[in-house]
Image (spheres, grey):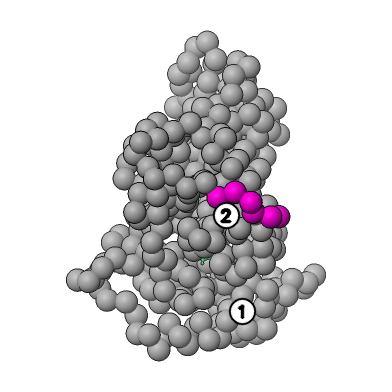
Amino acid sequence: MKRFTLFIALCLTLAACNKKAAEYQAELFVFGTVVSLTAAGTDEDTASKAFAEIGRQFQVLHRDWHAWDPGELTRLNTALATGKTVTASPGIVDLVIKSRQMETMSGGRFNAALGGLVALWGFHTSQYPVLGPPPATEEIDKIIRSRPSALDVEVSAGGLTSANPMVQFDFGGIAKGAAVDIAVQILREYGIPAAIVNAGGDLRAYGNPGGEPWNIAVRAPAGGIIGGLEVRGDEAIFTSGNYQRFRQDDERRYAHILDPATGWPVEGVISTTVIAAEGWRADAAATALLIAGSQAFAQTAANMQIDAALLVDENGGLHLTPAMANRLKLVDSGAWQIFEHPGTNR
Ligand code: AMP
Ligand code: MG
């Protein structure tokens, strides 16, 4: 999962920050980011217990799903490379199954089996920017020619087996979403009627505190916000960007999101934002749409059963699906060249 730089510092100083709506908040440092939890329509004791349970479960996920610190995922990857059948926790099996689905639906753009390529590019680190030239073309081509795919992995009662020794899982594009979903499940189990789980701007929100929708800001790549969205019901909103984590040499920057078709970083797109029912789906789709680029983004969204998505290109273009155009309240519509992408078929 993303950048697991530090262990969780669970801060449970509960604050009733808004007396009227009785919102309780806590912050966790996990997955290399601050995860902020907000619960409304509940009492302090219940919120505190739910937050503590989320903290406990996130510590386990942080360890088990880490792409390069030794743990369950690194052990799994070592075993997959030998062709042996290896047991995995239900959480990892679930990520494999979801990753296969996202790979198929995205036309191969989302590919969680390219951990070897992510490592080759030097992106198995918490230190950004990564400095230096790109890896040798032969090394990149060697991995791409072997076509690692999550679909090479068979899931059976005995465990996981890969038909392709080059498969190395890296769930960096989907695990944060899956973790946010687990947090929401815990909050619901505690009977909390409205909450937001916000992992560094990627979030899932449900319920209507005080009868009002949650108002969510969509981040702008250069800082600030693009616009606002009202969340009614239960929705996840995730953004992928090529502007925070990258490799840099004298010539240019290389984004940390890699195109499985070429093995090279995405170009031309700054960020994508997706709304979906679940965090894992929004997370994976945002990553896939960045790779799809402005031409293929709307059809790829439709193929992934995503209605509302936006893409910011490097020329100041704001590309919107019709559902996103209907919902997004732009802060400054004059700041963008707006492209609506109608007529995509599911
Ligand atoms: P996100 O910020 O959700 O877009 O995830 C980016 C992370 O996903 C990277 O740091 C890699 O760990 C991983 N990743 C990079 N390229 C891909 C890809 N084509 N498909 C799936 N995951 C990827
Ligand atoms: Mg993602």
State the extent of the magenta-drawn residues as a range: 341-346
| Marks 2 and 1 in Cβ contact (< 8 Å) | no
Check mark 2 vs ligand 2: CB closer than 8 Å? yes or no.
Answer: no
Count every numbered label the image shows and give the total: 2
| Residue 242 within the magenta-colored segment of the rendering | no
In 3D space, how far apart are the residues under numbered discs 2 and 1 (Cα atoms)?
35 Å
User: Which kind of residue does numbered mark 1 sit on?
Assistant: Leu
**In this picture, residue 156 sits left or right of residue 266:** right
Mark 2 or 1: in front is: 2
Q: Where, quadrant-wise, is the C terminus in this rendering?
A: bottom right
Q: Earlier in the sequence, mark 2 or mark 1?
A: 1
**Quick one: SS at disc 1?**
helix
Is residue 181 at least partly visible in the picture? no
Report the magenta stretch's main SS: loop
Give the amino acid type for the residue marked by disc 2 in the picture. Answer: Ala
> Is residue 343 a member of the stretch shown in magenta?
yes
Is there any visible trace of residue 193 in the rendered image?
yes
- Residue 80 has which mark? 1
Q: Secondary structure at mark 2?
A: helix
- Residue displayed at 29% across by 65% down: 253
Give the camera-side residue of 325 and 28: 325
Q: Which residue corresponds to mark 2? A: 298
Q: Position of residue 5 (x, y in %)?
A: 39, 55
